[in-house]
Amino acid sequence: NSVHGSANAAQMLAEAAAAEAAVAAAVASRSNSQGGSTEQSEATDRVMSSPSRDESPTLTLNNRHHPGSSPPTPDVRLYHRAVVAPMEPPLRGLVRQLSIDQLDNEGRRVSIYDKGTPEGKTPMFQRTISMPGVHKRVIHELLRPRQWKPNHEDRRFMLGADEIVELCDNAEKLFKQEKSVLELRAPIKIFGDLHGQFGDLMRLFEEYGAPNTAGDITYIDYLFLGDYVDRGSHSLETMCLLLALKIEHPRSVHLIRGNHEAADINALFGFRLECLERLGDEDGIWVWKRINALFNWLPLAALIEGKILCMHGGIGRCINRIDQISELERPITMEDGGPVLMDLLWSDPTTNDGVQGVQPSPRGPGLVTFGPDRVKDFCKVGAGVSI
């Protein structure tokens, strides 16, 4: 059973808040007194010695006391949460709480003063800074995994055309700075086709954690593999929230392109019609064109830890090296991308591993499926890369 709303949950939250307040007070006290280190230690000891659950495991040590040794600790109770309180002057007061099982992941991110930080690794403190703008409102209104419900009576979208364009402008600046093949680090969550199913996205966030500071965005990246629009009835919510999250967490949220991120496709499968119905004819066409212009700047693939290659489609008939994808210059349309972009966004694996080589795709003329032999050959050339 879920503990949300139960008396246990309320007590846990109250005790955790008291623990955090105690450490915050200790941090402030340390900065205002010369004997601060002793006070900080005492305050932290008080926090950590107060278990937050009655059912916390208890370990009773051997009570025998040998002469010349320190008296044994009678009852050591394991505290299920840790309080992270940086002591460096620029970060004083930045107090956070983590579950014990998240401490290892926290260590991957908190490397602010490490001069040897690998390229692409994001210090935690940098993630807390973001610019004001319409994206803040989008996140506040839409990132509600448990509360969001579709409004079937009023289909008007929450943002005006000008605000959506502003969102696109700010996100596009970030995409322009990125490579065609993103180089990402683990841990990372990977999301497949969303197709305007905003309710499904909220359920995924509720079940597996949400990309906000109350969730896991400080130590886990998010990668979305394209096909954000069409088919579902909430493509605008889906696209605008993902762009807002990209602006809010530019080094943690990553979007690559799918085959529906193209004007000739999403004009037929629902996105254009949704823009017209929910924004009006004139504003709807303007927004639809602006978002499709943004799609031409989306990265095309992602390489995780130099080993796992992610793309929307596959390697098709003509992709043999990652460099072929990296060399595609953006902004790029389907027509400009040629066979490489077509394979990248449209090709599929064969229906089973018994089907080898390159085969015609049931999707239509000119499209293909690729067998496991193609994957093995690609990975050999890629020196250990997996698809």
Image (tube, helix red, strand yellow):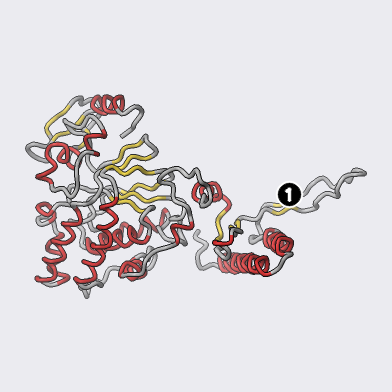
In the rendered image, residue 281, in percent from the top left (x then y), is placed at: 9, 70
Quarter of image, res 300: top left
112 or 23, nearer to the observer: 112
At horizontal 26% and vertical 41% (from top left) the residue drawn is 311
Q: Amino acid at mark 1?
A: Leu
In the rendered image, residue 69, in percent from the top left (x then y), is placed at: 87, 45
Left or right of 88? Residue 291 is left
Secondary structure beneath dot 1 equals strand
Please tell me how many numbered marks the rendered image carries.
1
| Outermost residue, left side | 365
In the rendered image, residue 381, in percent from the top left (x then y), is placed at: 29, 25
Above or below 346: residue 273: below
At horizontal 22% and vertical 75% (from top left) the residue drawn is 153
Q: How many C-alpha atoms fall within 10 Å of the one at disc 1: few (<14), some, or many (≥20)? A: few
Above or below 325: residue 191: below
At horizontal 14% and vertical 40% (from top left) the residue drawn is 342
In the rendered image, residue 185, in percent from the top left (x then y), is placed at: 41, 43
186 or 149, nearer to the observer: 186
Left or right of 290? Residue 47 is right
At horizontal 24% and vertical 62% (from top left) the residue drawn is 169
Which image quarter holds the C terminus? top left
Task: Tell me, yes or no, if residue 155 can be seen here.
Answer: no
Left or right of 285? Residue 162 is right
Q: Which residue is mark 1?
A: 59
